Amino acid sequence: MTAPGVDEGVRPKRVVVERRLHPVTPFRRAWAPVAVVVGWAAHDPNQAQEQLTRLTTTTLLIVLAVVVSAASLYGFLSWWFTHFAVTDSELRIRTGLLFRRTAHIRLQRLQAVDITRPLLARIAGVAKLRLDVVGADKKDELAFLGESEARALRAELLARAAGFAPETAHEVGEAPARELLRVPPRELAVALILTGATWGALAAALVVPPLLWLATHSVWTVLATGVPLLGAAGASSAGRFVGEYDWTVGESPDGLRIDHGLLDRTHETVPPGRVQTVRIVEPLLWRRRGWVRVELDVAGSANSVLVPVAPRAMAEAVIARVLPGTEVPATAALSRPPRRAGRCLPLWWRGYGIAVTDTVFVARHGLLRRSVALVPHAKVQSVRLTQGPWKRLWRLADVHVDTGAGKTVTARLRDAREAAELLHGQAERSRTGRRDARSDQWMA
């Protein structure tokens, strides 16, 4: 029976409940005042040392107590004044101790909802929820939530973005995932060893500092140059191994899920229909083993790697899940530039090639490190033809395909007449592709 005065067609207004982050969050926020003191000391170490030598033990303990108290108070207050709530149409985040900031994140514009668990967070049993929103330059985040709460909130947000009613979204739960690919640690380690960038960075770190010492005899110059080079060498080898360890790709109704990381575990989602470009990278030393790396351009997202290393057949099977109905053309099927292109780019012109299928525009470049880019016709934003004086002399032109991720894929050194036909043909394919494109909605 309907209560008197209540219209049956009017849905009762949903009560919005604001929630706080996990109680461990103040310990994370408390580092801000300490970082200010450390930054001051690092900026002028001599003055900092002089100030420390002037302080007595009692004064030093008092200063330490004040800093710790201020840090604790700042951490607590910043946590206390941070709230979030899920309304009928948006996720609302209120932050700020002195300067208040409220973020209104429309659920329909969610690109991805990722869960990251740094090492200390894993020990504490908490996780960070990162939100990728269309048109936003910076990701909003909720750090930290309990692991179970983070997964439940992620599932609710994705269900709401997919169009489920607010009353039932929290009951949908996390969509099941089917594993497609897992990268063995040994295969990842061998692939990094066979990567030229690893050896190049290591050689620079070993050769440049001794040469600088012989030229300048300055320890500070050697350290200022050598430390960043060693860091770059570590990041390209050990850093990548730690970050890409146990890389797993799974398929679920809300997109492809990627889990990886040795110390910091990351749970990412490749948004359905948001992939603008897929790149198949094949370094020289990987070819004998038949390995490739798959990279992505996703509009408004930081996701850039789909598969760090895998046999080509397995990688193409994963690509077929990202771009349904797409087959990667064989190398022999790619059309090379005419031989006169060697007048503009000797030898390296042989590394270029293109192909056009019913679903994607394909462009290849590189001889030593081959890279094949696949752009779905529906994701092409604009097509341009460029032709400089030297290329005009040899009747050559470049065709540039711009995507929604702000990137460009180029078919270089094509015959001028072929380039003109490619320009007009691609514009038509892009128009019809957008008309027939699949839905971008979650779980569609």
Image (tube, rainbow, N blue to C red):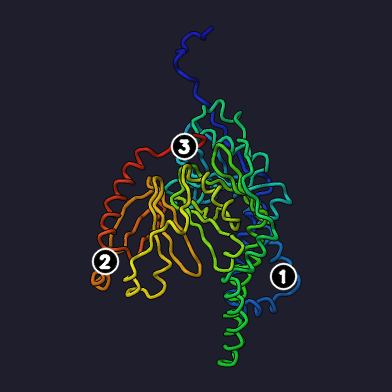
What distance separates the C-alpha of mark 3 from that of mark 1?
58 Å
Residue 195's disc number: none
Residue in front for this viewpoint, 181 or 345: 345
Name, please, the residue furthest toward the right.
57
Task: Say which of marks 3 and 2 sits in front.
Answer: 2
Q: Secondary structure at mark 2?
A: loop
**Which residue bears the numbered disc 2?**
387
Q: Secondary structure at mark 1?
A: helix
Does 48 sit above or below residue 150? below
What distance separates the C-alpha of mark 3 from that of mark 2?
39 Å
What distance separates the C-alpha of mark 2 from that of mark 1?
69 Å
Residue shown at 57%/55% (left/top)?
A: 312
Query: Label 3 amino acid?
Result: Gln
Whether residue 246 sits left or right of residue 332 in the image: it is right
First in sequence, mark 2 or 1: give its number: 1
Which x, y percent locates residue 263?
Answer: 69, 57
**Which residue bears the numbered disc 1?**
60
Residue in front for this viewpoint, 2 or 368: 368
First in sequence, mark 3 or 2: give its number: 2
Which x, y percent locates residue 223?
Answer: 61, 81
Circles 3 and 1 in contact, beta carbons < 8 Å: no
**Which residue bears the numbered disc 3?**
441
Residue in front for this viewpoint, 16 or 44: 16
Does 253 sit above or below residue 366? above
Circles 2 and 1 in contact, beta carbons < 8 Å: no
